[in-house]
Image: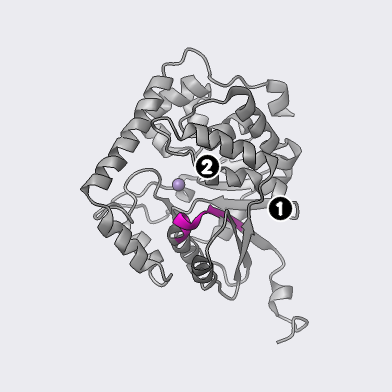
Amino acid sequence: MSIFDTGSPINKYTKVVPVFLTINNAYAPYAAATIHSLTKHVSPDRYYKVIILHDGINLVNRWRLRSLVTKNVALQFKKMTRSLYLKAIITYCTRRQKGAGDFFSSAVYYYRAFIPMLFPIYKKAIYIDSDVILRGDIGELFDIELGDNALAAVIDPKVTDIKEFRDYVDNALGIPHEEYVNSGVQVMNLKKMRKIRYLTQMIDLIREFDADLVAPDQDYLNLILRGQILPLSPVWNAEPTKDLPRNVKLVHFNLFNKPWHYKDVPCERIFWNAARGTGFTGELKRQQASFDEKKQKEDHEKVAALIEKAKKLGKSKEPIIKMNKEKSQD
Ligand SMILES: [Mn+2]
């Protein structure tokens, strides 16, 4: 069929839904489950483009991920270039990796901050973590009206639930915890983020304060975009629970109890159903089998260290990072 035929994709799919993931080789198997779940819940009338920001994905992983494309879900790889901005972030992350509770010190977490600048062709886009599984059409999330907000995201349930995180957000960041969002699912107003120079602001804060934070890039996101974030319905970034409400459209295996590490964790069926058919199931099963007592112990200690860090910083008398109001509100 020629692209000039009536009803061909080029005519029908006018509005592309861009969905970004940021990964390295280690994240590829989880990202495959995420993308696979996305393709199973798309609307047949729309066109979706999954864009993978990475730092060098090997050919096998690339080939496996590419095999997930469907009639209306395309895939694009974009390798992060070594800009001065990225260099500043990598240096910052490398220093942070020496401390305890350094859960989020990988530079991969920061790639999403580059999306507005790297993709000027888009005004709006979705970002999702590679530890999420879709149960609804991501196009619906894309359609949410942002108005003048820079972002839409879900109020972080882990912060709501865990006292140490609440105190950390309230005292160390100086943000009321009821406003603090999780960065694992974002509807980004790229036009607005470019306008306020989001990435530049983040680099400036990193350079000025060199702060040792609990969830660095998520903390910067909340600090920089404070007052410009639209809270999303929790169905778009839900914690895995035993009796998951039926209306949940996206499950986020955030922080603990990753189903590829542990058996008998909430919503594991949802994860394994999405992983099936990606070509990564064997690798994921092997990961789970090799996650022995020693690794489990290390994992628990890592989480405990993160909470301990939040507890310590939560006693701050004043925010660690002093925001320049004029600059942040542009
Ligand atoms: Mn996550």
- In the rendered image, residue 23 lying in the magenta stretch gets the answer yes
Instruction: Say which quarter of the image contains residue 294.
Output: top left
x, y percent for residue 131: 44, 52
The numbered dot on residue 119 is 1
| Label 1 residue SS | loop
Q: Residues within 10 Å of mark 1 (few under 14, many from 20)?
A: few
x, y percent for residue 253: 39, 49
Q: Residues within 10 Å of mark 2 (few under 14, many from 20)?
A: many
Residue type, label 2:
Ser
Q: Looking at the image, is 59 positioned above or below residue 304?
A: below
Left or right of 250 on screen, residue 296:
left
Mark toward the viewer: 1 or 2 = 1
Residue pushed farthest top?
A: 317
Left or right of 169 on screen, residue 125:
right
Q: Quadrant of the C terminus?
A: top right
Residue pushed farthest left?
A: 293
Q: Which residue is mark 2?
A: 183
Residue pushed farthest right?
A: 4
Magenta region, residue range: 19-28
Residue found at x 41% / y 72%: 277
Residue found at x 32% / y 55%: 259
Residue type, label 1:
Phe
Q: Quadrant of the N terminus?
A: bottom right
Distance between the alpha carbons at the discs numbered 1 and 2 = 19 Å
- In the rendered image, residue 299 lying in the magenta stretch gets the answer no
Residue found at x 37% / y 60%: 271
x, y percent for residue 200: 70, 35
Instruction: Say which quarter of the image contains residue 158.
Output: top left
